[in-house]
Image: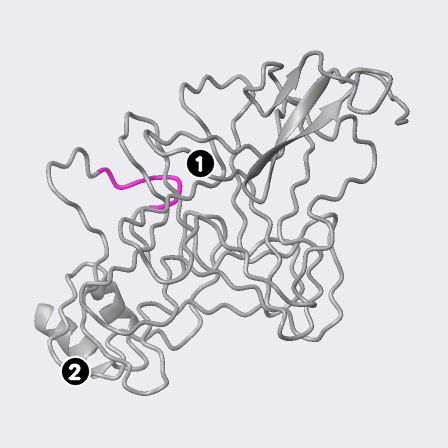
Amino acid sequence: MANKTETYLNQIADPVEQRALSELRKRNINISRKSSNAINVSVVQDDETGLDETAVFKHGTYSTALAYGSQTDHMVFKSMHVTAAATAAKWVFGDVNYIETSADSIGYIDVGYNYLSVGHNLVNGFASRGRVAVTAACTLGEHCGVLGTMEIGAYAIDKTGSATLSAGIFDTEVTAGATVKQEVTCLEIRPRIRANIEGSSCGIRINIHCSSTNYVNYGLDIRSMSAQQTAAIRILATPTSDALPCGLHIEGQSSSTSTVTNAISLAGIVTNVLDFASTDGTNGAARGTWSSCGTTTQPDGYIKVDVGGNTMYAYLWNTVVAFS
């Protein structure tokens, strides 16, 4: 029956008889000659309910896994390795998964869903991994390991609840009562740039295109809602030798249209404009007693600043004073 199986596949018989399909499920599939579609499903398969039945392909079920046991070498369940070149303005795709909605839905649609369940010791685990390797000298355009795009046409879009439309969402949940002895983050960026490059390099770039109409309100919008939160932004300098030159750099280019009107804008209820942990000058501020500086009250502290490379001081008082 193995020869008949190969014959059915090579000829891409349509319709395929039920008896042949039943036999194909029992046999290995080997395609040894060219065809337009090596395997083609051209009719809608039986509708299935639940997660344990699949319409086209099954390798175990969602609820019952095939037990492969411990492995001492690499194990690959699906593999593809080809060479190709897009010599015209066309794409070469490894996979194209395309789903269109056919009616209003109250459920969810995932074009791709990867689920890693970890119940034992594991060094590293990734539900999805994208990788681009540049292996020779070449001319490149835009390349990335992961690309997410959200496109909204010129249509009237209503909303469900308070949900947002996003090109990417990262969600980390630690269940109440869990004991986790390591740091937890929702997103970690690891730039490892070991050679100098032309232009700037960064961990995160928010590139807001201004050459055409763009109604972006904020480049970065942090909404603080946790009573246990320490700060909205933390900059922790941990170099082993060199000091961090600047914690926050704000720059307006030299033109009338690329200036920064307010380096920092405060609105709403703000208790202190600045907060210094130490009083001995370690954090750039100090408390003490100095000469009157033109007032009847001596200053009680200062803030150290740099103006054009020159160290200068802004003096402080414990109470509001009147200058003479």
- Graded by Cα atoms within 10 Å as few (under 14), some (14 to 19) or many (20 or more), the crowding at tag 1 reads few
In the depicted view, which residue is nearer to us: 37 or 44? 37
Quarter the N terminus occupies: bottom left
- Percent position (x, y) of residue 128? 36, 49
Q: Which residue is mark 1?
A: 244
Which residue is rendered at x = 54% and y = 41% of the image?
A: 309
- Residue 95: name its quadrant: bottom left
Q: Is residue 294 above or below residue 45?
A: above
* Element class at badge 2: loop
Q: Check the image and name the residue furthest to the left.
A: 3
- Percent position (x, y) of residue 249? 56, 46
| Sooner in the amino-acid sequence: mark 2 or mark 1 | 2
Which residue is rendered at x = 57% and y = 38% of the image?
A: 310
Residue 79 counted in the magenta span: no
Q: Main secondary structure of the magenta part?
A: loop
How is the rendered protein coloured? one colour
Q: Is residue 52 above or below residue 208?
A: above
Q: Would residue 66 be found to the left or right of residue 114 on screen?
A: left
Q: Is residue 200 above or below residue 236?
A: below
In the depicted view, which residue is nearer to us: 6 or 36? 36
Quarter the C terminus occupies: top right
Q: Looking at numbered disc 1 in the image, what kind of residue is underneath it?
A: Leu
Q: Would residue 18 be found to the left or right of residue 171 on screen?
A: left
Q: Which residues are magenta?
A: 61-67
Residue 63 counted in the magenta span: yes
- Percent position (x, y) of residue 199? 40, 61
- Residue 4: name its quadrant: bottom left
Note whether residue 1 is visible: no
* Element class at badge 1: loop
